[in-house]
Amino acid sequence: MKKLNVHLENCYGIGKMNAEFDFSKKSAYVIYASNGTMKSSFAKTFKDHSKDLNPQDEIYQDRIPFKNITYDNKPIESNSVFVIESYDQFFMSKTGISTLLVNDELRSEYGRILISVEEKVSELLSLLNQTSGLKQVDLKKIISNTFTKKDNKLFRAFECIQNQIIDNSIDVSLAEFKFESLFNEKINKLLESEEVQDKLKDYTIEYERLQDECSFLKKGEFNHYQVNEIAKQLENHHFFRAGHKIIFNLKDAENKVFETENELKDFINKEISAIFGDKKLKLIFEKIDKLLKNKELREFRDILRDNQDLLLKIKHRETLKRNLLVSYIMKHRNCFEDLMKAYNDKKMRIDEITQIALGQKTKWQESVDVFNQRFSVPFKISVENSTNVILEGVTPNLRFEYEDYTGTKKLVERSNLLNILSHGEKRALYLLNIIFEVLAKKQEGKPVLFIVDDIADSFDYKNKYAIVEYLNDIFETKGFHQIILTHNYDFYRTIRSRLRLFETSFIVTKSKGNVFLKKDEIYHTPFNKWKNSLLSGTNDEKIFSLIALIPFVRNLADYCGKNETSEKLAKVLHYNSELYNIKVKDLLCDYSKVLNLKCLTIDNLREEWVIDLIYNAADKMVNRPQSPLELNKNIILSIAIRLKTEEYIIDKIGKDHIDLKSINRNQTGILIKRFNDFINENNMDNQNLNLINRVKIMTPENIHINSFMYEPLMDLSLENLCNLYKGIDCLE
């Protein structure tokens, strides 16, 4: 792709625009456009195009919009356009992040391994779903979180469960209870109450006392569950039918011999019933039972009445939850063991891949690194689930760590972070999402046209240069083209210089709704251009440069300590009694002293009055057709406007009422204020007052050598300055 042609009409305030962008030599254009000329309108139009929408004129909706955008004479595809807006607080990269979950080869192998056990996982979860009453999605999360404190570590949780099953110490009778009959919000809230906790403690203490008094139970080693399990195992394995006997070593009594299943069962039931039938224990239970009045707790109350031994377990909620989940799996032990055998056969390779994944950085991680390294903000960003990003294709979680002036670090949510950041810092966070999108498009390997709309607005200089560096990264990417729009002249000059876009830098002018791109004639060093024009330019170029240099040379004279020259040049910039005595030859003499130039001459104009030269140059500009933006013309018009304004004010108030010698600086501003006071004091109805006040707003007080001071003039269109000059010139 080489040439982009753009033809727009009635698109968000752009009356008409025809432009060609030739990317055959440079892959980027930088365009300086003052506010209100075309930036946002241009970006909106291209954003509509990227969404397959038609642009419009939001104010004059009866005007029919027209858009024709072609690349090499072919319509540009919507997915080939990406608009980077100045700022969008709610923009969150989704496509970009998901596309950047790279490392396909590693993830594919991981997936192939897991697919071999996935069917067994589904089979087990289906059985557990029926037993627990939980949905499979919730079940996976609960099992994982219970055993690993993470929501997505199911196999690691299964490994923990496998170890518990080997111990064979789990009460499998728990499997008869549905999960939510023991664990729900109402039950959790009840069991957290201090009153219930105290009653459970009393119940446990009393039970343990009774257990110690039992002839065959022993606290911490041999409880009623274990003795019941032994009885069941003996029965299942036909122990007594084979003629065997079992002897219980009783406390404080002779050993007891059991020769049949019924004898053993009767003895165990009698002893355990004696414990749970104890009056004191029953009294404590009744107190707990009374606390379960709530309708939502009715099922839980019934369960406890029929299974009083649960009271010994519910106090330790996490242990009970683990044992409950294991009991579900124990009920389907064969299925679980088949699953774990398949998993363990592949586990070594899974561990190897996991370690490789931890050591690799995805493009997503590179995006985070670029942001942390380049942008100066009070927070750092990291990846919370990096292994899963690579292996399982899940969307990565951003982790924001804020650091204040004391060096104290604290994790914060993105929403809270936005509340405390400055506007520039918020924009930096927005750019992180843009970085995701750009890298994703880079990974796709398809040509993309980026429309960049005032991306550096509200940034401090350190972060502005970070943006410049990042735009340069895009510039260096094959197949990526950029049109960078800005109203910040310093940023424009920096982009122009850093990306070396000398041939593709343009200035926007606008006349009667029509937008034009003009090759940059201002240059990043206008001072040198004007100085050279004095030596070798055409007559008009010499005149324009001579006038435009007045404030700059005066500024240089100040820096060099040439006070007398500085004061003489100041008299050309403000109305005073000596203004009409200064000739061009006097100006050339002062320039030679400051600029160290020996051959400054404008032969046919040496005897001309400088004030006439200024006014003639301004008249020439306003009377010729609209011309492109040039800094020297804006400066000349600003000087002429101020001189005519001061002359008008002095004439109206009267020379006898104004002591110009007492005004040391900002003469125009002071005179305008006095004119306002004069009108008010004399109750005069001056219809020209608004026009006079516009002079103060539109023409800057100081025009210095550095770009910071003449940027305000760049933001003013030549058309506006011409209209203001004509208005002031007509004042009576």
Image (tube, grey):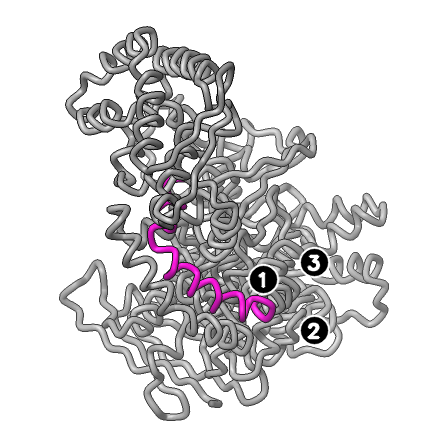
Magenta span: 323-350
Q: Which residue is mark 1?
A: 365
- Closer to viewer: mark 3 or mark 2: 2
Give 326 or 271, whichever is nearer the viewer.
Answer: 271
Above or below 728: residue 340 = below
Q: Secondary structure at mark 1?
A: helix
Left or right of residue 621: residue 175: left
Viewer can see residue 589: yes
Residue 91, horizontal then vertical, whole percent: 39, 55
Q: Which residue is mark 2?
A: 533
Q: Earlier in the sequence, mark 2 or mark 1?
A: 1
Left or right of residue 471: residue 46: left
Is 417 one of the magenta-colored residues?
A: no
The amino acid type found where label 3 is placed reads Lys
Q: CA gap, disc 2 to disc 1?
A: 53 Å
Residue 268, horizontal then vertical, whole percent: 35, 27
Q: Which residue is mark 3?
A: 583
Q: Earlier in the sequence, mark 3 or mark 2?
A: 2
Q: Residues within 10 Å of mark 2 (few under 14, many from 20)?
A: some
For the point 28% across and 78% down, the residue is: 67
Give 113 or 355, whichever is nearer the viewer.
Answer: 113
Total residue callouts = 3
Q: Are marks 2 and 1 in contact (CB under 8 Å)?
A: no
- Closer to viewer: mark 3 or mark 1: 1
Q: Residues within 10 Å of mark 1 (few under 14, many from 20)?
A: many
